Amino acid sequence: MKALTFMLSFVLVTSAAVGQRRSADFLSGTIVDLSYAFDSETVYWPTAEAFHLEKDFEGVTETGFYYSAYKFSAAEHGGTHLDAPIHFAQGRLTVDEIPLGELIGPGIVVDVTRQCENNPDYRVTTDDFTRWEKKNGRLPNGAMVLLRTAFGKFYPHRKKYLGTEERGPEAVAKLHFPGLHPEAARWLTANRLIKAIGLDTASIDYGQSTLFESHRILFDKNIPAFENVANLDKLPPKGFSVIALPMKIKGGSGGPLRIIAILN
């Protein structure tokens, strides 16, 4: 009986140690936060309401302890957020239906900073992807593709980031920022197996888009998009993992996103 007890204790201790090592290994890389905080400066589409945080209570209660509680209101699509396929593709996945495995995977960064420097209407092309592959190898299956335009350096300055600081429907025609060319979206969905795609601007389609073709092409294949992604300048072209977890809004077309990269 003593021998059995000792054996069980040894197994439990060993298992705990292995678990701790695995946890340490998983978190051993540098963690990069790719999300902006939500506050009064958060960038939303010109037709959307801004983020609001209201105080319910903050201070010392009648019984002598500190307590704080707040409530917030926000559109699904603003700040660092996820666009679910249902956003532009009828019958496709809502934000709560996206399998978690599709939101975790190897990350890559396609840097188009130079192309966007003097062209706020630049659209990332198929050639940009094939040039990346010539330097770094074929896009890995299950890749989380991130597009760096360097517009993140302007966030949250609406005029520089969006092209206009005006709000309302009439402001939409004045939007100017880079996005993904529909032909590149079509090439990706037809020739590569990616899980998701994101970028450091307000939309996967460029600001002047009226048909939102890249959204429609990607979402028809149930490939979600991450928008207003932060800190892409801190990532290498490859060699990191991405975890992107949105608010689980049942039936939602998107939601606020906490996204991180773990450098291998």
Image (cartoon, helix red, strand yellow):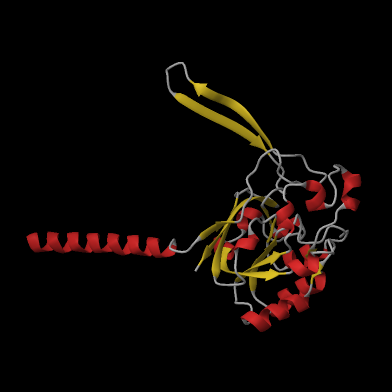
Q: Is residue 63 left or right of residue 162?
A: left
| Direction top: furthest residue | 62
Residue at image point 89% right, 51% down: 174
Q: Position of residue 193 (x, y in %)?
A: 64, 75
Quarter-wise, where is residue 228 in the image?
A: bottom right
Give coordinates of residue 249: x percent, y percent.
63, 48
Rendering coords of residue 82 (x, y %): 67, 55
User: Which quadrant of the rendered structure holds the N terminus?
Assistant: bottom left
- The answer to whether residue 33 is seen in the rendering is yes
From the viewer's perspective, is residue 224 above or below residue 69? Answer: below
- In the rendered image, the residue lying farthest to the left is 2
76 vs 137: above or below: above
Residue at the location (91% across, 46% down)? 170
- Image position of 145 (left or right of 165): left
Q: Is residue 180 visible?
A: no
- From the top left corner, tell me how far across and down residue 73 is, in percent: 68, 37
